[in-house]
Amino acid sequence: MSNFRITRSWIPELRIIETRRFADDRGHFSETFSQSALADDGFDAPFVQDNQSLSRATGTLRGLHFQTAPFAQDKLVRVIAGSVWDVAVDLRRSSPTFRQWYGLELSAENGLQLLVPVGFAHGFLTLESDTIVAYKVTAPYSGANDAGVAWDDPDLAVGWPLPVAEPVLSDKDRNLPRLAHAALFD
């Protein structure tokens, strides 16, 4: 068996990556990234930066974020500690899945990863306190190209499994535009 199993969500551009774990009395070991495994599945863009976030509180919501060209990013997302409800929203006007979203639980326990391609907004909701999310990106951060869509936009109707009455949001995320006023991809 390969160390990686890559499947597609019902939105075919979204790849779900399952890594093989080798366990013994000490714990476990897993290879968490392989450029060649992704290339074998047709993804060959090089990652240029690793990012990591710590969310102290359960119910912290980060997103929905993306960057516009020429700094649009593919993201490979995984959880190092805790768990999240991870969401990708298709913002490609020409796509048959435009405005549709896909979500799944990523956790330190299940070891799943989600590859979110250019053209999608990304966000997550923490399901546990002290959750650490790490992600690789194919373009560096650019403040001038930083964009997003409101997490609670009724036109998207993302099914967030809120573990608290109100999510913990940054001011930036609280003020993201609705889809009708957001930058989109062709």
Image (cartoon, helix red, strand yellow):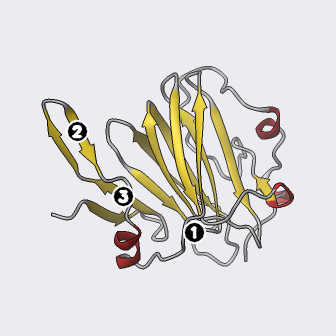
Q: Residue at x 50, y 51 (%)?
A: 77
> x, y (%) of residue 181?
86, 57
Q: Which corner quadrant holds the C terminus?
A: bottom right
User: Judging from the image, what secondary structure is the residue with disc 3 in?
Assistant: strand
On the rendered structure, is 90 left or right of 30?
right
**C-alpha gap between disc 1 and disc 2:** 38 Å
> x, y (%) of residue 76?
50, 57
Q: Residue at x 29, y 53 (%)?
A: 19
Q: Label 1 belongs to which residue?
A: 97
Q: Label 3 belongs to which residue?
A: 17
Q: Quadrant of residue 109?
A: top left
- The mark nearer the N terminus, 1 or 2, is 2
Crowding at dot 1, Cα within 10 Å, few <14 / some 14-19 / many 20+, comes out as: some
User: Judging from the image, what secondary structure is the residue with disc 1 in?
Assistant: loop
Crowding at dot 2, Cα within 10 Å, few <14 / some 14-19 / many 20+, comes out as: few
Disc number for residue 154: none
On the rendered structure, is 165 left or right of 130?
right
User: Judging from the image, what secondary structure is the residue with disc 2 in?
Assistant: strand
Between marks 1 and 3 in the image, the one whose residue lies nearer the viewer: 3
Q: Is residue 154 above or below residue 41?
A: above
Nearer to us in this view, 126 or 139: 139
Nearer to us in this view, 146 or 162: 146
Residue type of the residue flagged with mark 1: Thr
Residue type of the residue flagged with mark 3: Ile
> x, y (%) of residue 173?
76, 39
